[in-house]
């Protein structure tokens, strides 16, 4: 358990260090091309809004026929010593 915690903290520290390392490059891009950076920020915001907005109907045909009235459950079948599942036979009821 302690090892998992240590691994998680190390991972987060590396990610934060990498993120801080990109700050000078991003500031330089804002100084060199402020309009381009602003346009990219607007495009990102519009994309996030499009992804997070509520949808009244699905866009694709695959999701059009979905329903909450249908439920699929996993079936538990015993694995017998005679190889019933492997041989294609039904297990005893």
Image: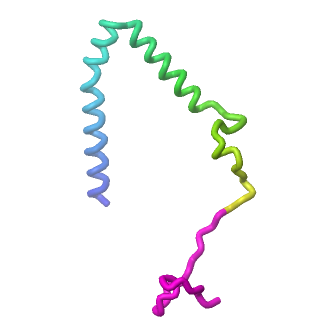
Q: Position of residue 61 (x, y in %)?
A: 66, 42
Residue 5 or 92: which is nearer the viewer?
92
Relative to 45, residue 73 above or below: below
Residue at image point 47% right, 93% down: 82
Residue at image point 24% right, 26% down: 21
Q: Position of residue 78 (x, y in %)?
A: 53, 84
Q: Main secondary structure of the magenta part?
A: loop
The answer to if 78 sits in the magenta stretch is yes
Outermost residue on the right side: it is 69
Residue at image point 31% right, 7% down: 31
Q: Is residue 85 left or right of residue 64?
A: left
Where, quadrant-wise, is the C terminus in this rendering? bottom right
- In terms of image quadrants, where is residue 10? top left
Residue interval drawn in magenta: 72-93
Q: Position of residue 34 (x, y in %)?
A: 38, 7
Residue 89 or 33: which is nearer the viewer?
89
Q: Is residue 1 left or right of residue 64?
A: left
Q: Position of residue 2 (x, y in %)?
A: 28, 58
- In terms of image quadrants, where is residue 4? bottom left
Relative to 29, residue 4 above or below: below
């Amino acid at each position: 358990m302690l090892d998992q915690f240590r691994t998680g903290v190390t991972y987060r520290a590396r990610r934060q260090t990498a993120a801080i390392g990109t700050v000078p490059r991003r500031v330089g891009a804002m100084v060199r091309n402020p309009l381009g950076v602003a346009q990219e920020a607007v495009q990102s915001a519009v994309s996030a809004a499009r992804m997070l907005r509520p949808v009244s109907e699905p866009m694709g045909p695959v999701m059009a026929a979905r329903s909450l009235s249908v439920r699929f459950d996993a079936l538990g079948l015993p694995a017998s010593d005679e190889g019933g599942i492997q041989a294609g036979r039904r297990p005893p009821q």
